[in-house]
C-alpha cells in the first residue's frame, strides 16, 4: 500500500515539474500546479455559483450538451453495472462509460494518460488511498454541491467525498463454526483453538494496520501486539482475493476468514451460502473498521458538467443503488441495515497515508512462510 502510493506520487510529482500547456480537455496534462483545464473549471464554477437547489438542473442541462461521461472505478462488476444502468436511465442524453479495474490500476491509468496528454476520465470512484493520492497532486476539482450536506464531516476530504465504505469484520461458515466458537474479539484470532482454521488475504495491509493501531491506542504495548500477530499468522493459511476466500468459505473448504468485507459476506449469505459476519442475535462485538471509498471529478475533465452530475448523483440517488446491493453508503438511506448490530471504530486514514511506514512491507513480512489455504491453490 505505502509502496504503490509512493511510486505513484513520485511519477505524478515528476509530471508536476515537467507539466506545461493547457489541461487535458484542452490537449494538455492534468494536475499541474499552475495550469489545469480552464474550460473545465469554468463549468464547475458556473454550476456551483448557483444556489444549491438549482445546481443539479444546470448540471443536467450542460451535461446533456456534452453528451458523454467517462468514469474510472474500482467498483466490482455487478455494482458498476448497476450504477451505470441507473445513471443512464435517469440521464438518457449522457452516454456513460465505465472503465473498471483495481484501485492501483485506476491510479496508474490516470497518471499514464496524463503523461500522454490524453486524459480519458472525467470522474473517478475508488479506494481512499488512490483518491488521497490524486487529491494531494491537485488532480481533482473541488465539489461544493448539495451532496456535501448529506455526508458526515469525517467523510469529506478536500477534493473528494466518501460515497461508500468497505467494513472489515471476520466471516465464518455457520456449518463449520459453532456460535460458541465464533471469535468475540480480534485478539481471539490468536487462540490456538483456531490453529489451521483461519484464512488471511495477502493484500489486507490496511486491515493489519487498523487492528494494530486499535490495539496500540487501547492499552497494548508493541511487544504484546507483535505476539498477537505471531499467533494469528501461525493459525492461518493465505489465499488471494476477497471473493475467492468467500467462495471457499461458502463451499465449506475453509471455516473462518480473518477479515472480509461485510457486503461480500452478506451477498453470499443471501445467495444461500452458510456464511455470516453477525451472531444469531444480529450483532458482532468486534470493532469494525469502515474503509472509505470515494468519488471525485477531475480538473482536466473533457466533460466537466457530466463529471459534476455523477459526483452529485453518487451522493444522492446512487446511494440507493449501493444499498440495494448491500454495500454500506456514506449517507443515511431508508432501508439500509448494513451497520445494524455493528460497532464501528474510526478507520485510520492518517496512519495509512503516512509515508513514514510501509504497511504493505510490514504485512508481507508477517505472512512470510504462510502456506496457501485449503482449496485455494
Image (cartoon, rainbow, N blue to C red):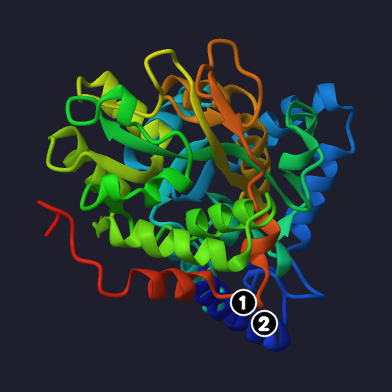
Location of residue 324 (image quadrant): top left
Q: Is residue 9 above or below residue 224?
A: below
* Nearer to us in this view, 223 or 175: 223
Label 1, secondary structure: give it: helix
Classify 10 Å Cα crowding around label 2: few (below 14), some (14-19), many (20 and above). Answer: some
Q: Residue at 62% of width from left, 41% of height from top? A: 306
Location of residue 269 (image quadrant): top left
The location of residue 296, given as percent across then percent down, is 65, 49
Q: Seen in the image, is 183 located left or right of residue 63?
A: left
* Nearer to us in this view, 276 or 335: 276
Q: How many marks?
A: 2
Q: Is residue 76 above or below residue 277?
A: below
Q: Residue at 54% of width from left, 52% of height from top? A: 211
* Nearer to us in this view, 113 or 277: 277
State yes or no: discs 2 and 1 in contact (Cβ < 8 Å).
Answer: yes
The location of residue 278, given as percent across then percent down, is 41, 24
Q: Is residue 134 visible?
A: no
Provide the residue designation for mark 1. Answer: 9
Q: CA distance from mark 2 to mark 1?
A: 6 Å
Provide the residue designation for mark 2. Answer: 13
Location of residue 363 (image quadrant): bottom left
Q: Seen in the image, is 90 located left or right of residue 296?
A: left
* Nearer to us in this view, 30 or 144: 144
Q: Residue at 27% of width from left, 56% of height from top? A: 236
The location of residue 72, given as percent across then percent down, is 48, 52
Q: Residue at 40% of width from left, 65% of height from top? A: 230
The location of residue 206, given as percent across then percent down, is 51, 57
Classify 10 Å Cα crowding around label 1: few (below 14), some (14-19), many (20 and above). Answer: some
Q: Is residue 99 visible?
A: yes
Question: Considering the image in quadrants, where does the C terminus appear?
Answer: bottom left
Amino acid at each position: 500500500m505505502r509502496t504503490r502510493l509512493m511510486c505513484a506520487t513520485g511519477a505524478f510529482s515528476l509530471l508536476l515539474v515537467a507539466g506545461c500547456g493547457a489541461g487535458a480537455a484542452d490537449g494538455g496534462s492534468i494536475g499541474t500546479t499552475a495550469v489545469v483545464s480552464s474550460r473545465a473549471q469554468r463549468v464547475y464554477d458556473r454550476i456551483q455559483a448557483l444556489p444549491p437547489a438549482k445546481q443539479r438542473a444546470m448540471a443536467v442541462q450542460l451535461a446533456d450538451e456534452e453528451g458523454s461521461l467517462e468514469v474510472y472505478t474500482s467498483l466490482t462488476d455487478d455494482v458498476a453495472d448497476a450504477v451505470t444502468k441507473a445513471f443512464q436511465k435517469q440521464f438518457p442524453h449522457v452516454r456513460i462509460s465505465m472503465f473498471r479495474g483495481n484501485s492501483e490500476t485506476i491510479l496508474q491509468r490516470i497518471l499514464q494518460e496524463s503523461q500522454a496528454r490524453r486524459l480519458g476520465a472525467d470522474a473517478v470512484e475508488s479506494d481512499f488511498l488512490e483518491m488521497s493520492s490524486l487529491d494531494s497532486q491537485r488532480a481533482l476539482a473541488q465539489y461544493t454541491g448539495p451532496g456535501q450536506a448529506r455526508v458526515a464531516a469525517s467523510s469529506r476530504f478536500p477534493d473528494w467525498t466518501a460515497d461508500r465504505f468497505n467494513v472489515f469484520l471476520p466471516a465464518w461458515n455457520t456449518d463449520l463454526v459453532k456460535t460458541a466458537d465464533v471469535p468475540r474479539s480480534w485478539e481471539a484470532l490468536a487462540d490456538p483453538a483456531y490453529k489451521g482454521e483461519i484464512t488471511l488475504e495477502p493484500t489486507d495491509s490496511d486491515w493489519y494496520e487498523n487492528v494494530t493501531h486499535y490495539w496500540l491506542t487501547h492499552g497494548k504495548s508493541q511487544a504484546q501486539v507483535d505476539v498477537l500477530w505471531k499467533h494469528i499468522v501461525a493459525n492461518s493459511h493465505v489465499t488471494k482475493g476477497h471473493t475467492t476466500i468467500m467462495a471457499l468459505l461458502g463451499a465449506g473448504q475453509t471455516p473462518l476468514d480473518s477479515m472480509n468485507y461485510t457486503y461480500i459476506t452478506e451477498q453470499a449469505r443471501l445467495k444461500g451460502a452458510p456464511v455470516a459476519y453477525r451472531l444469531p442475535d444480529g450483532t458482532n462485538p468486534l470493532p469494525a473498521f469502515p474503509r472509505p471509498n470515494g468519488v471525485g471529478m477531475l480538473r482536466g475533465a473533457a466533460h466537466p458538467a457530466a463529471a459534476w452530475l455523477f459526483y452529485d448523483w453518487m451522493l444522492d440517488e446512487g446511494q440507493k443503488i449501493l444499498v440495494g446491493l448491500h454495500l454500506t453508503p456514506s449517507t443515511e438511506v431508508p432501508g439500509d441495515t448494513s451497520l445494524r448490530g455493528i460497532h464501528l471504530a474510526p478507520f485510520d486514514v492518517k496512519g495509512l497515508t503516512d509515508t513514514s511506514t510501509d504497511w504493505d512491507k510490514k504485512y508481507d513480512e508477517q505472512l512470510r512462510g504462510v502456506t496457501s489455504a485449503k482449496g485455494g491453490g
